Amino acid sequence: MIDIPKTETLLSSEQIFNLLPHRYPFAFVDRVIEYVPGEKIVAVKNVTINELHFQGHFPGRPIMPGVLIVEAMAQAGGLIVTQIPEFPKGLFVFTGIDKVRFRRPVTPGDQLIITCNLISVKQQRFGKLKAEAVVNDTLVCSGELMFSLLDKPGD
């Protein structure tokens, strides 16, 4: 029998749906297992063969697209921002990615453990995160992600 470590769920997928606008097939955070308000989050993304992108990426050798790994990291980071009470409510979007590196393929059956640390925030509208994703304690992706609050239509 394999000894699988137990991790406490701080935010379930239902709670995450109340905080992020992403929905199937573009919701990539299954739960949160660690959270330091305004500073750090550790989230889980379970990678399954049932995900649509594996139909074409690649037949016979399913590999999670790197851009979706980065999106999963961004969604985890978005959960930090949505929990800062003094931040305005709205849609935070990518404005840039820097220093992103992919170290090894992510395949069905893997469990991404995503850690994001908030580096900086300016004017409660712009921010920067340091993010990394690991599978079985092996780094698979890391980088810096920038985000901005999107103006409401008509503003």
Image: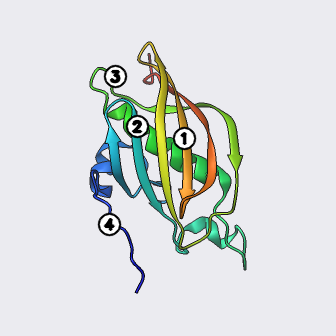
In this view of the protein, can residue 153 be seen by the observer? yes
The reply to whether dot 1 and dot 2 touch (C-beta < 8 Å) is: no
Kindly identify which residue carries mark 3.
87
At x 55%, y 51%, the residue is 133
The reply to whether dot 2 and dot 3 touch (C-beta < 8 Å) is: no
Label 1, secondary structure: give it: strand
In this view of the protein, can residue 21 be seen by the observer? no
Q: Nearer the viewer, residue 77 or 136?
A: 136
Separation of marks 4 and 3 at Cα, in angstroms: 33 Å
Task: Give, as a three-letter code, the residue at label 4.
Answer: Lys
Seen in the image, is 41 located left or right of residue 100?
left
Find residue 107 and report its image quarter.
Answer: bottom right
Give the numbered dot on residue 131: 1
Label 3, secondary structure: give it: loop
Quarter of the picture holding the N terminus: bottom left
Which mark sits nearer the N-terminus, 4 or 1?
4
Kindly identify which residue carries mark 2.
40
Neighbour tally class for label 3: few under 14, some 14-19, many 20 plus, Cα within 10 Å: few
Give the numbered dot on residue 6: 4
